[in-house]
Amino acid sequence: MAEVFLLEDSRSLRRVLTTHLRDAGHNVTSFENGVASTDFELVGNADVLVTDIVMPLVGGEDVIINVQSQFPDLPIIAISGASRERLDALNVFGKLRKGFWMGAAGLNFVALYLIPTKKNEIPAVSRLEPVW
């Protein structure tokens, strides 16, 4: 399936997302902050990047800027408990708000429908609108 690059500072959420995505057949490389997003050789192997917005050291907005400057076609899914306005301001493939979508149905949606199955393959939905 896909190579997923996951950046999430919450250990428990990172563990849940990693497990669920792997169970769906994806390979997941996960980190606790956005520092790894500056390793362009590593990021270049990803089919999709899933990033939290509020993280220590390098936050999600900086991750998005760094990655889009080098890989403008890489789908990025932003997840956050931050304000709706903060997520709305992002120019990314998908936006999901923590909380409402974190149940099994939301995780299945992310794992099965949003993650490309091959390098540079965009999922069936063209863009994911925010889930509020």
Image (tube, helix red, strand yellow):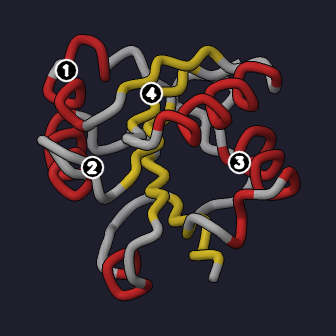
Query: Can you name the residue that lies furthest to the front here?
Result: 12
Between circles 4 and 2, the one closer to the viewer is 2
Q: Position of residue 46 (x, y in %)?
A: 44, 22
Q: Disc 1, disc 3: CB below 8 Å? A: no
Q: Residues within 10 Å of mark 4 (few under 14, many from 20)?
A: many
Which residue does the image show at 62% across and 15% down from the upper left? 27
Specify the amino acid type for callout 1.
Phe
Name the quarter where the N terminus is drawn.
top right
- Labels 1, 2: front one: 2
Measured Cα–Cα span from mark 1 to mark 3: 24 Å
Quadrant of the image containing the C terminus:
bottom right
Q: Compared with residue 19, is residue 87 higher up or lower down, i.e. above or below?
A: below
* C-alpha separation, residue under disc 3 versus residue under disc 2: 21 Å
Q: Which mark is residue 40?
A: 1
| First of labels 4, 2 by sequence position | 4
Residue 5, labelled with which disc? 4
Q: Which residue is mark 2?
A: 55
Q: Which residue is mark 3?
A: 110
Amino acid type of the residue tagged 4 in the rendering:
Phe
Kindly indicate whether the residue at mark 2 contacts the one at mark 3 (C-beta within 8 angstroms): no
For the residue labelled by badge 1, is the local secondary structure a helix, a strand or a loop?
Answer: helix
N-term-proximal mark, 4 vs 3: 4
Helix, strand or loop under label 3: helix
Where residue 92 appears, as percent x and y from the top left, is: 40, 60
